Amino acid sequence: MTVREFGRLGDDVVHEVTIRSKAGAEARVITWGAVLRDLHVPLPSGGRQRVVLGLQTIEDYVEHSPHMGAIAGRYANRIAGGRFLLDGVERQLDRNQAGRHALHGGGAAFGKRLWRLAAHDETSVTLTLVSLDGDGGYPGQLTATCVYRMVEPATLRVELTAVADAPTIVNLAQHAYWNLDGSPSVLDHELEVDASFYTPVDEDLIPTGEVSAVAGTPFDFRSRRPIRFAGRDGAPFRYDHNFVLSAPRPTRDQPLRRAARLRSPRNGLTLELHTTEPGVQVYDGHKVDVAAPGLDGARYGANAGLCLESQVWPDSPNRPHFPDPTLRPDEVYRQISEYRFA
């Protein structure tokens, strides 16, 4: 475990903590945005492979990062119109998506704020953030905790918890861009999603309220296949959609359910996502166009990484038949997601 100064934002120091497994997996986390900046895992054939996209300086993150590796919140993904009702009171949030909708917490986004380094050891780092009542329009003061933990031999476990002093909504998500072989595009990676249904969206990527079957559609990843998919007109299909996980709800005996499996056909490396959450947002990175150089000078263009965001379904506060994201003062929000490499 090492801690170093990654940069400064005014008088505030941004730290980077490196944690490791005995098997050779190594993660680097910075306190700005609780960002997973880098992750190397052992390859089946020997050696190690970088598996996430990252940037080189804190200035590049502030100016150019599309939530790269960050913890998105207070409410990850989208809320239609930036409005919702809670206990009969309408709340108006920051509308940071084209001035119409709330996305990833708006102006008070957790992924673009400095978290406090609370604890660290050889295999884990704990970060905390206090979001005041009214931040971005959200009610209640919320205290969030993020723990990154390396589990042998090559699993990154992300534990997210939160408590609030008044009723509010919360939906946190780890927003890493995964690339298992360093190729310029992940479209030839093979993806399997444990979902028989998904939530269709309108032109603004807001759920319509429907829950539709994936069978016979471009959203059918029930069997492993390349992410690349062409429509009837030959144009590439673009993914930025929530999938409804099929496995039973987690229990005390079985706390996590498998959500997705991603494989590189080039090096045989496989990532499995297991989570407590009811949905996973699959975003193929088609809008990625990062002006700053990435790790080792890499250029990150369209489809450079795939996001697999464990989450409550988007726009849940406005859809009573969607999972409820409400957090009350006597409750603890808790999410666990594991990224298991083989």
Image (cartoon, rainbow, N blue to C red):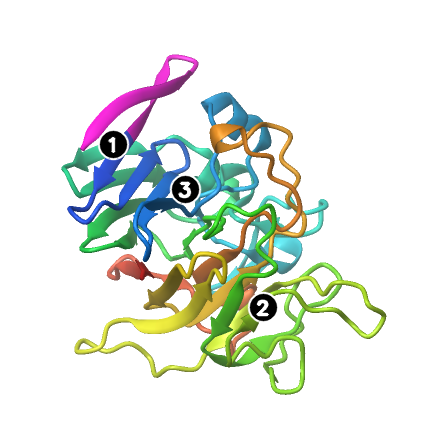
**Is 279 on the left-hand or right-hand side of 251?**
right
Residue sticking out furthest to the front? 45
Q: Secondary structure at mark 3?
A: loop
- Considering depth in this image, is 88 or 84 the residue closer to the camera? 84
| Residue at 41% across, 72% down | 278
Instruction: Write down the residue under mark 1.
Output: 117
Q: Earlier in the sequence, mark 3 or mark 1?
A: 1
What amino acid type is highlighted by mark number 3? Asp
- Considering depth in this image, is 38 or 206 the residue closer to the camera? 38
Query: Mark 2 and mark 1: span between their CA atoms?
Result: 39 Å
Residue sticking out furthest to the right? 233
| Residue at 82% across, 68% down | 234
Instruction: Write down the residue under mark 3.
Output: 133
Give the number of the mark in front: 3 or 2.
2
Q: Which residues are magenta?
A: 1-16
Determine which of the numbered discs, if any, sits on residue 226 in the image: 2
Give the number of the mark in front: 2 or 1.
2
Q: Mark 1 and mark 3 in contact (Cβ < 8 Å)?
A: no
